[in-house]
Image (cartoon, grey):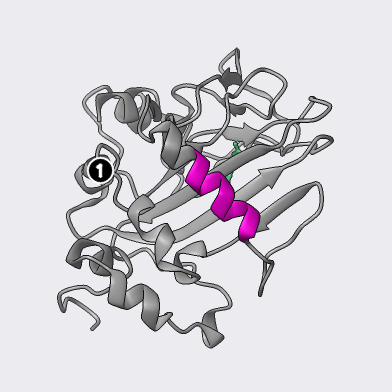
Amino acid sequence: MQALHDQGFVLLRGVLSPSLVDEVRAAIDQLMPIHWDYTGLVDHYKCVLNRNPIWLPYLDLPGVIELAEAGMGEDCHVIGQTAWRCHPGFIGADLHADYLAMELPSSLLEDPTFELPMQICTAQLYLDEITEDLCPTLVIPGSHRAGRKPLEGETSWRGQQAQPVLCQPGDVLFLRSELWHAGSRNRTRDRTRYLLQVHYGRRMVAQKFSPYLDWQFNPAVLDACTPRQRRLLGDHESAEYD
Ligand SMILES: O=C(O)CCC(=O)C(=O)O
């Protein structure tokens, strides 16, 4: 939690065992594009949580879910779960922040007694050894306190360039939505980066379950849920606006 407040991210080592890493990779290989998914140099499968109960355990992984609940409340929920394959030639993305609840003055953000509350965080489960040439996620430590998103073409903040997160299969990068970050190029000739993301939000943050109006929960998934997983999928106690 301290790292999330100070740096805007934390790298959790060895969350998935090698056999689970293999299982998730194989499950990603079985995915077929539906709805708003796309394939090409990057294959991007959204809301995999609704396709099959096999994705449920990754919503509340020990060591990760505690962090999500500590940061976004005991009633936080999952707003998406996305599987990726980034193939050789994938060009990566520009530096960005996923979500900024509001722009805030620097006088407040520079005040060490002010703690910026988290609204949305993402757990990135790496399923490969991430080397400099295999799409490392780039991050600028502390940039969650910039109070704004990066401008087009901006590649540094306060003189700091984005740095690659190099890690092992089974490691999890947990990052706040305000952090300036980017997925980077796949410069290898023959390796594909496999990634599973789980996006968590405070309860009042809307779930991004596309294609929205046509969304229906898969009964097989609901049947297989633990009570905590049901809550993470949106089965909350009644509250304001219900
Ligand atoms: O590909 C990555 O490592 C980062 C993904 C990312 O930037 C995002 O989903 O917003």
Q: Is residue 131 above or below residue 38?
A: above
Q: Judge left or right: residue 21 versus residue 38.
A: left
- Residue 141 percent across, percent down from the top left: 47, 21
Dividing the picture into quadrants, the one containing residue 66 is top left
Q: In front here: 154 or 65? A: 65
Can residue 223 be seen in this snapshot? Answer: yes
Can residue 101 be seen in this snapshot? Answer: no
Q: Judge left or right: residue 91 versus residue 72.
A: right
Q: In front here: 169 or 23? A: 23
Q: In front here: 2 or 126? A: 126
Q: Is residue 186 above or below residue 208?
A: above
Magenta part of the chain: 22-30
Task: Look at 30% across and 40% down and name the residue there.
Answer: 64
- Residue 73 percent across, percent down from the top left: 20, 52
Q: Judge left or right: residue 115 versus residue 215.
A: left
Task: Give the farthest residue toward the front.
Answer: 19
Tell me the quadrant of ligand 1: top right
Is 27 included in the stretch rendered in magenta? yes
Task: Look at 55% across and 41% down and name the residue there.
Answer: 97
The crowd level at tag 1 (other Cα within 10 Å; few <14, some 14-19, many 20+) is: many
Is 99 included in the stretch rendered in magenta? no
Quick one: quadrant of the C terminus? Answer: bottom left
Residue tagged 1: 71
Quick one: quadrant of the N terminus? Answer: top left
Q: Judge left or right: residue 225 versus residue 83.
A: left
